[in-house]
């Protein structure tokens, strides 16, 4: 079975690729590297050039995909606009690529992950079934200035074209599943597949905790999309009250993924985000490093993933709520913190194992069931 993976989202596709290859499948990954995260792939759709040279290079890459990436059993794409080009004349070639993918491959699926137009539209139109989402509580931030207001004519075309040229949408968590159910009900929504993480058997972290609790804030206070302002406000209050018991480091920029994975091993607690019902890849990297993770973990997402419980501390876009959850950790005995760390590690190694998720992925792609 041949599988083509297009686009990237914090190494979602890279980890799935490794899981598929473990079972003997042929999997190829083509992506832009997800910006400054510099995630590896078989073919990088990006350019060190600027201006006209960049456009020419990108066009060559797109044409290469047009004429060489055919006869795959399954193609998956993360985000409809996965090609990192803004201009309409390249954007429409992206739409043409979708059509060609379907014509010359057996099945094409969209991974519902990230800020595609359907998700953004769902959020700003009232986010039915959710009390909050990443596009609420924006504190006056102009979504158009941030480049995340995906409602222009180019994206609207996808509403018409996409259902005709894909075999289904595969969500990764409740937030995206709910968005596609509500906004694009003509899509074939497949079973939600958990995020996957490929790990080696001998990777066992240090679960011990020192005299001070070491906390990594992976969001800057300007990261409105992930709730950075609420997290920063809570942490400032924590530092004032417990400066002798906690040390806080804030990661104010995106760094290459391999650096992030190594850096995160130095901490006891990792804060991922507070404006999502589910948790992302950063949470998985934190748990496998033996960290306690604070992120989205609402009951709706647990149900979506068929879980009764998960060892992620749920935090919401509320500075008081986040403060109380961090304070609770500070006041816990060291042995309880160690237990939480081990529980997180064991959970991610069992539930999010890329080898198991790869089998589930193949089953979903072959299944005719929709939800």
Image (spheres, rainbow, N blue to C red):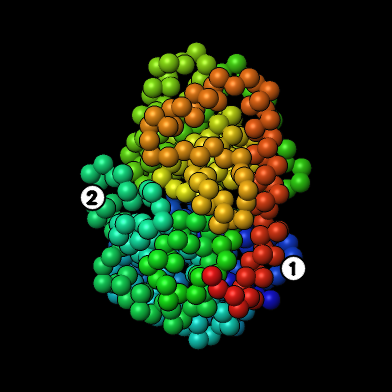
Element at label 2: loop
User: What x and y, as percent, mark residue 282?
Assistant: 53, 45
- 202 to 27, vertically: above or below: above
| Residue 10 marker | none
Mark 2 surroundings within 10 Å by alpha-carbon count, few (fewer than 14), some (14 through 19), many (20 or more):
few
Q: Residue at x 62, y 60 (%)?
A: 16
Looking at this view, name the residue that lies furthest to the right: 202
Residue 280 visible in the picture: no
Q: Residue at x 41, y 45 (%)?
A: 275
Which residue matches tag 1?
24
Q: In the rendered image, which quarter is residue 55 located in? A: bottom left
Q: Left or right: 50 with respect to 245?
A: left
Looking at this view, name the residue that lies furthest to the top: 244
The residue closer to the viewer here, 362 or 49, is 362
User: What x and y, as percent, mark residue 33?
Assistant: 49, 57
The residue closer to the viewer here, 216 or 319, is 319
- 332 to 118, vertically: above or below: above
Q: Left or right: 187 with respect to 290?
A: left
User: What x and y, as percent, mark residue 181?
Assistant: 44, 67
Element at label 1: loop
Which residue matches tag 2?
142
**On-image quarter of the N terminus:** bottom right
**On-image quarter of the C terminus:** bottom right
């Amino acid at each position: 079975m041949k599988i083509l993976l297009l686009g990237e989202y914090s190494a979602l596709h890279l980890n799935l690729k490794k899981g598929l290859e473990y079972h003997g499948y042929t999997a190829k990954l083509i992506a832009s590297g997800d910006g400054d995260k510099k995630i590896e792939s078989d073919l990088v759709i990006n350019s060190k050039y600027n201006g006209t040279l960049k456009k020419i290079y990108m066009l060559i890459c797109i044409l290469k995909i047009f004429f060489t990436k055919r006869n795959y059993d399954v193609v998956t794409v993360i985000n409809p606009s996965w090609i990192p080009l803004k201009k309409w004349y390249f954007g429409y070639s992206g739409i043409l690529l979708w059509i060609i993918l379907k014509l010359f491959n057996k099945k094409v699926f969209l991974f519902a992950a990230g800020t595609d137009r359907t998700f953004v539209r769902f959020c700003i139109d009232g986010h039915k079934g959710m009390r909050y989402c990443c596009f609420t509580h924006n504190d006056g931030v102009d979504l158009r200035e941030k480049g995340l207001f995906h409602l222009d004519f180019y994206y609207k075309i996808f509403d018409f074209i996409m259902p005709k040229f894909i075999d289904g949408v595969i969500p990764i968590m409740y937030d995206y599943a709910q968005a596609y159910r509500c906004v694009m009900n003509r899509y074939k929504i497949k079973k939600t597949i958990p995020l996957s993480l490929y790990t080696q058997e001998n990777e066992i972290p240090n679960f011990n905790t020192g005299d001070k609790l070491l906390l990594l804030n992976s969001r800057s206070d300007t990261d409105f999309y992930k709730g950075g302002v609420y997290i920063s406000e809570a942490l400032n209050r924590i530092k004032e009250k417990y400066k002798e018991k906690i040390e806080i480091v804030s990661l104010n920029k995106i760094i290459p993924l391999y650096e992030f994975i190594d850096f995160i091993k130095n901490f006891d607690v990792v804060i991922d985000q507070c404006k999502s019902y589910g948790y992302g890849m950063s949470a998985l990297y934190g748990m496998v490093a033996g960290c306690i993770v604070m992120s989205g973990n609402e009951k709706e997402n647990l149900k979506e993933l068929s879980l009764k419980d998960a060892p992620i501390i749920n935090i919401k876009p509320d500075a008081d709520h986040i403060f109380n959850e961090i304070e609770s950790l500070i006041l816990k005995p060291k042995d309880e913190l160690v237990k939480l760390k081990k529980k997180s590690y064991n959970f991610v190694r069992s539930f999010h194992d890329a080898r198991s998720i790869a089998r589930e992925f193949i089953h979903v792609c072959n299944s005719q069931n929709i939800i």
